[in-house]
Image: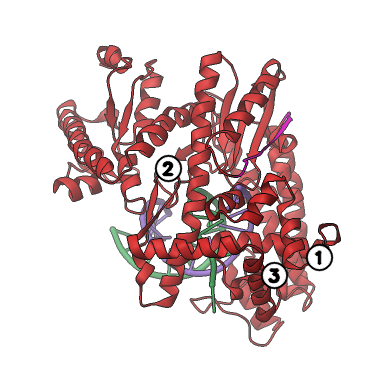
Chain colours: A red, B purple, C green
DNA sequence: AGGATCAGCGCGT
DNA sequence: CTACGTGCTGATCCT
């Protein structure tokens, strides 16, 4: 059957319609069919129209066609042990299901296509999201090579440390219990050991034992530091070091993540099974895990390229703030410059503490932070935090105006937009509830920035992919981590690829401040980053 | 006994 | 009471 349709699939002048087309591309690829031509994905069309709604076909069909498609369960049974695979389903039943599936998709495409036009989303759909689909399909297909032995060694060491920490904690606590249970841990700390008077509680009235809480109790009892150590080790082993090798595809011997293009409210991608967008980096022990993400052979290198301060640069672009733009045009250390101006000292006089505070403030600004939030984050009184914010806005008056402008636009239109016209609806922007409204206001500030950064890297990915094809390069794009791209590069292509990737990323979209990219190379992700 | 779901937690940008 | 995600373990509820 696949063979009969193959000529049609490979015609570049025929539009292909589907619901979650990346999946179909991957299935057809297994049959040796390379799909060409423009794509129309109903799932992604609907994602652009209303990113925070569900995008599955049953839901779309119910809402837009007033029709409930044949549930898949009637073919393969309910989830669980007895569930069949599609291959085992009676052909007549399967035919009805498949034909309906195609029909519903087509009917949806007529409606969603019209809506994309009406709502000015056709451009981002046709120029960004649809061309990105085959790029992501290729990245997923390629997969990344994992050094299983490296992880096995780490696992053995970490488990040893874990056992040691556990033993010491039980000795100090005077009893054994399940350390992985926050509830049991809370009872031991606050009822048995009674390390403080009025312990903080969670919203369900359990004792709070999260890192922030424990950190504040670190001086009260020596067991606290051990618990923090245990938590860190347990996280690394149970989330990364042990599960990752199990997820290697035995046929390809690679780790194949899935990039989801229709999940986030802002336009970012997400990554699952496994999530390769949250591999540890901050902590030294966690960072070691990156040594297991290796180039595909001795003749290849792991190459990493990431945008420097892309979100703050977008704040400078959108706000038009002359001072912030000047800092980026001069390629200054933005946190140092911010500290110098906010604390009114010479740039070379900025202390480490001042720079850190400025850095926190800069991040806070992108998220629409309050004086309360900033004081919590910096560990300073709220009055001091307010002074810093006031001084920040005095330094960058354009930023303050822009933030107000975002909220104004959101109130008028009920939505905000990225540079490509991608939008986020903000129905709560006029809510009577100040907590709900405040959340919408922060989204009004953050979504255009975070979303435009997502637009930019998506454009860069498409251009890089096309350029690799055009030049016949063997380099493979492997991973995207929001402001970073990772590649497997034959050593002889490294020079050309470095220039090409840097240029595609920096020139993805013209802005009134420069975008800069930093690159790194090594045998693995640890060395490249 | 085993699955589904929620809470709590912590990893990334 | 700073934005956006994924996924682990334990607890609890349901079948």
What span is in magenta? Answer: A513-523
Between A337 and A374, the one lying in front of the other is A337
Residue A285 can be seen, yes or no: yes
Residue holding disc 3: A378
Q: Residue at x 26, y 40 (%)?
A: A117
In the rendered view, tell whether residue A65 sits above or below residue A19.
below
Relative depth, front residue between A500 and A474: A500
Query: Which class describes the residues within 10 Å of circle 2: few (<14), some (14-19), or many (20+)?
Result: some
Please determine if labels 1 and 2 lie on a single subunit.
yes
Give percent across and percent down for residue A321.
59, 56
Q: Quadrant of the C terminus of chain A?
A: top right
Determine whether A251 is above or below A445 in the image.
Answer: above
Image side of residue A79 versus residue A65, left or right: right
Number of other residues with Cα within 10 Å of mark 1, as a class: few under 14, some 14 to 19, many 20 or more: some
What residue do we see at 15% from left, 45% from top? A65
* Tag nearer the camera, 3 or 2: 2
Q: Quadrant of the N terminus of chain A?
A: top left
- Nearer mark to the viewer, of 3 and 1: 1
Q: Which residue is mark 2?
A: A420
Residue at mark 3 to residue at mark 2: CA–CA distance: 35 Å
Residue A296 horizontal/vertical position (percent): 65, 23
Residue A177 in view of the camera:
no
- Residue A456 badge: none
The furthest residue to the right: A349
Q: Residue furthest bottom?
A: A197
How far apart marks 3 and 1 lie (CA) works out to 20 Å
Q: To which residue does mark 1 refer?
A: A345
Quadrant housing residue A476: top right
Nearest-to-viewer mark from 1 and 2: 1
Q: Was residue A396 drawn as part of the magenta stretch in this picture?
A: no
Is there CB contact under 8 Å for labels 3 and 1? no
């Amino acid at each position: 059957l696949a063979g009969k349709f193959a000529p049609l699939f490979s015609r570049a002048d025929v539009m292909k319609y589907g619901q979650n087309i990346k999946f179909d591309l991957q299935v057809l690829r297994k049959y040796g069919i390379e799909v060409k031509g423009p794509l129309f994905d109903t799932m992604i069309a609907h994602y652009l129209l209303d990113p925070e709604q569900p995008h599955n076909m049953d839901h779309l069909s119910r809402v837009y066609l007033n029709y409930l498609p044949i549930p898949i369960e009637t073919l393969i049974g309910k989830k669980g042990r007895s569930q069949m695979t599609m291959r085992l389903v009676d052909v007549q039943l399967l035919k009805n299901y498949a034909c309906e599936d195609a029909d519903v998709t087509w009917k949806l495409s007529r409606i969603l296509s019209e809506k994309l036009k009406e709502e000015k989303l056709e451009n981002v759909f046709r120029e960004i999201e649809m061309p990105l689909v085959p790029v992501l399909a290729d990245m997923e297909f390629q997969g990344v090579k994992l050094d299983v032995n490296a992880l096995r060694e780490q696992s053995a060491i970490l488990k040893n440390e874990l056992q040691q920490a556990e033993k010491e904690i039980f000795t100090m606590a005077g009893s054994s219990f399940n350390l992985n249970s926050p509830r049991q841990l809370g009872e031991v700390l606050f009822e048995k050991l009674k390390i403080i008077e009025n312990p903080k509680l969670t919203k369900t009235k359990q004792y709070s034992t999260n890192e922030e809480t424990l950190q504040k109790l670190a001086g009260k009892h020596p067991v606290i530091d051990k618990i923090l150590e245990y938590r860190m080790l347990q996280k690394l082993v149970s989330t990364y070091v042990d599960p990752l090798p199990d997820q290697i595809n035995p046929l390809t011997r690679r780790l194949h993540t899935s990039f989801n293009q229709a999940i986030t409210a802002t336009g970012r991608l997400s990554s699952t099974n496994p999530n390769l967008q949250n591999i540890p980096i901050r902590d030294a022990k966690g960072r070691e895990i990156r040594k297991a993400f290796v180039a595909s052979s001795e003749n290849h290198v792991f190459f990493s390229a990431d945008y420097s301060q892309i979100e703050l640069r977008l704040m400078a672009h959108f706000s038009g703030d002359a001072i912030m733009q000047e800092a980026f045009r001069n390629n200054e250390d933005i946190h140092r410059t911010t500290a110098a101006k906010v604390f009114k000292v010479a740039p070379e006089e900025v202390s480490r503490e001042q720079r850190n505070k400025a850095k926190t403030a800069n991040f806070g600004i992108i998220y629409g932070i309050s004086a309360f939030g900033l004081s919590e984050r910096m560990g300073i009184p709220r009055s001091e935090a307010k002074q810093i914010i006031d001084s920040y806005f005095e330094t960058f008056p354009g930023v303050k105006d822009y933030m107000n402008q975002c909220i104004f636009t959101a109130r008028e239109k009920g939505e905000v937009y990225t540079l490509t016209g991608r939008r986020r609806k903000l129905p709560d922007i006029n809510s009577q509830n100040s907590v709900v409204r405040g959340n919408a206001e922060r989204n009004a500030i953050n979504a255009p920035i975070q979303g435009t950064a997502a637009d930019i890297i998506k454009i860069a990915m498409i251009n890089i992919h096309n350029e690799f094809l055009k030049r016949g390069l063997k380099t493979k794009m492997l991973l995207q981590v929001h402001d970073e791209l990772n590649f497997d590069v034959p050593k002889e292509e490294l020079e050309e690829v470095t220039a090409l990737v840097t240029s595609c990323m920096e020139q993805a979209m013209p802005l009134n401040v420069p975008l800069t990219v930093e690159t790194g190379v090594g045998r693995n992700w640890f060395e490249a980053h």
